[in-house]
Amino acid sequence: MTTGLKRQGCFGFLPGGRLTPEEEFLRNLDLRGKIIFDVGGFLGLMTLFFANRAKHVVTYEPLPESRQRIAKNLELNGFGNVTLRDVALSSRPGSLTLIFDDLMSGGASGDPEISCELASSMAHPRLVTVPVTTIDLEIASGQPVPDLIKVDVEGMEYQVLRGMFELLGTSKKPWLYFELHTTHEDKQTNAQDVIGTLRDLGYIVYDVERGRDIGRSETITGMESHVWGRCRK
């Protein structure tokens, strides 16, 4: 995914071998001139990918250590077209306590059930309370209107979606890319909430792993991992 770019601490999308469906899908997107919101930046792998192709990227990463890694990776590659935001995104402003393991900060989650599951499996769980806002409030405060929003927030995808309803109610509906997470028991509910809402908003929803659109009357199974929403023309 980031072949030819310098990076520290990013081990996904390593070059070589067969591309995953997600890699192949993202590589085929035409991002020239696009404004992208990268919601859930982790160490900046996707930010680097987007910054190398798009006009501007706004990356949301509330954890200070991860944000520092992103800044370092951007510096290594000389990218000046990225805005780093130190807030989490959800359905309404406030604060949120994230739980994570130092060895896997990319798995940090504020989702209550995922947090409980993580806490029970971690030797040394860490808690960090971070400020929260919404995509609609970000745009109202001066961030550019995005052409694409990528969301990877460990189980809080639906809450982020609810925080952009004002944007999605306009004629400028962005592309939407969700990585769906949550506990095994609730994955179907999360997928139904996200995909069902996108359908209600007039989006065509594409299952990246299966390589096809999800029919409007099709049952959502919870097996959907990466979904792409685009507006009907």
Image (cartoon, grey):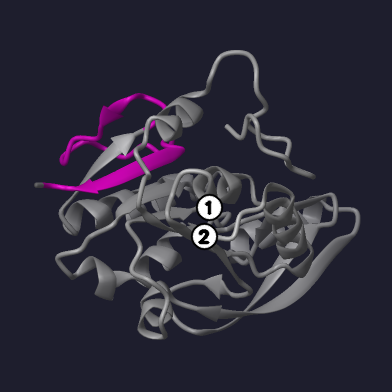
- Residue at 44% in and 35% down: 26
Judge from the rendering whether residue 69 lies leftward or rightward of residue 54; answer left or right: right
| Magenta residues, start to end | 208-232
Instruction: Give the residue at the far left of this rendering.
Output: 233
- Residue at 46% in and 38% down: 225
- Residue at 37% in and 44% down: 31
Which image quadrant is residue 206 in? top left
Q: How far across and down, in percent of the image, does residue 23 sit?
A: 50, 29
Which three-letter amino acid code belongs to the residue tagged 1? Asp
Give SS at disc 2: strand
In primary-sequence order, the first of circles 1 and 2 is 2
Q: How far across and down, in percent of the image, does residue 13 sit?
A: 63, 31
Which three-letter amino acid code belongs to the residue tagged 2? Val
User: Mark 1 and mark 2: span between their CA atoms?
Assistant: 6 Å
* Nearer to the camera, 223 or 205: 205
The residue to which callout 2 is attached is 39
Give SS at disc 1: loop
Q: How many marks?
A: 2
Q: How far across and down, in percent of the image, does residue 111 sit?
A: 58, 64
The majority secondary structure of the magenta stretch comes to: loop
Magenta stretch: residue 1 in it? no
The residue to which callout 1 is attached is 152
Q: Residues within 10 Å of mark 2 (few under 14, many from 20)?
A: many
* Nearer to the camera, 70 or 123: 70
- Residue at 32% in and 57% down: 147
Q: Quadrant of the N terminus?
A: top right
Q: Is residue 148 visible?
A: yes
132 in relation to 109, above or below: below
Magenta stretch: residue 228 in it? yes
> Which-is-in-front pick, marks 1 and 2?
2
